[in-house]
Amino acid sequence: MKTLLTFLIVLISLSAHAKKLATAIVNPITYQGIIYQTIPWAVANGTDQNGGFIAAVEVASGKVIWLRQLYKTSYTSGMERDAKDVFIESLELNSSKTGLIIKNENEQIFSLSLDGQLFQADK
C-alpha cells in the first residue's frame, strides 16, 4: 500500500510539471500549384514563438513564397514557454477559394488571402 501511495504521489507531481502535449497535425492545402501549411515549431526555424505561422510554398520549386505570423503569443516569466504556446488547429480554403480560414487552440479565427497580404482576426 505504501508503494502504491508513493507511486501515485510521484505520478501526480510529474503531471503537474508536464510539458504541453504535442499539437495535432494540420493537413496542408494544395491549390493552384501552391502548398499552404502551418509551421507549428517555428522557434526551430528562427522565429520567437511556436505556433501562429502559415507558409505558402510553390509546389514545383519548393520555394517559400511567403511566411506570415497571424498572432503573437505572450510569454510569462517563470512559466515554461511551451505551456503558453498557441498552435493552429485547422486550416481550410474558404468557400470562394480566395483565402484561408485558420483556427487556433484559443478558438480565434483568422482569414488570410492567398497572396498572404490581407488577414483579419475574428475574436
Image: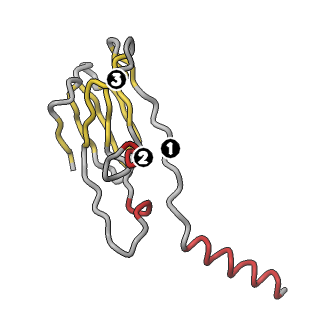
Residue type at the position of mark 1 = Ala
The residue to which callout 3 is attached is 57
Q: Residue at x 37, y 33 (%)?
A: 91
Q: Nearer the viewer, mark 3 or mark 1?
A: 3
Disc 1 vs disc 2: Cβ atoms closer than 8 Å?
no
Residue type at the position of mark 2 = Ala
User: Which image quarter is the N terminus in?
Assistant: bottom right
Left or right: 20 in relation to 85? right
Q: Secondary structure at mark 1?
A: loop
Residue ranking furthest to the front: 46
Q: Nearer the viewer, mark 3 or mark 2?
A: 2
Left or right: 111 in relation to 79? left
Q: Nearer the viewer, mark 1 or mark 2?
A: 2
Give the Cα separation between the discs numbered 3 and 2. 18 Å
Give the Cα separation between the discs numbered 1 and 2. 18 Å
**Is the residue 21 above or below the residue 60 in the image?**
below
Q: Earlier in the sequence, mark 3 or mark 2?
A: 2
Position in image of residue 119 (x %, y %)? 18, 36
Disc 3 vs disc 2: Cβ atoms closer than 8 Å?
no
Residue ranking furthest to the bottom: 2
**Is the residue 86 above or below the residue 99 in the image?**
below
Q: Secondary structure at mark 3?
A: strand
Quadrant location of residue 26?
top left
Position in image of residue 72 (x %, y %)? 25, 53
Give the Cα separation between the discs numbered 3 and 1. 21 Å
Residue type at the position of mark 3 = Val
Q: Earlier in the sequence, mark 1 or mark 2?
A: 1
Q: Secondary structure at mark 2?
A: helix
The residue to which callout 1 is attached is 24
Dot 3: within a 10 Å radius of its alpha carbon, few (fewer than 14), some, or many (20 or more) residues? some
Left or right: 83 in relation to 2? left
Q: Which circle marks residue 44 in the picture? A: 2
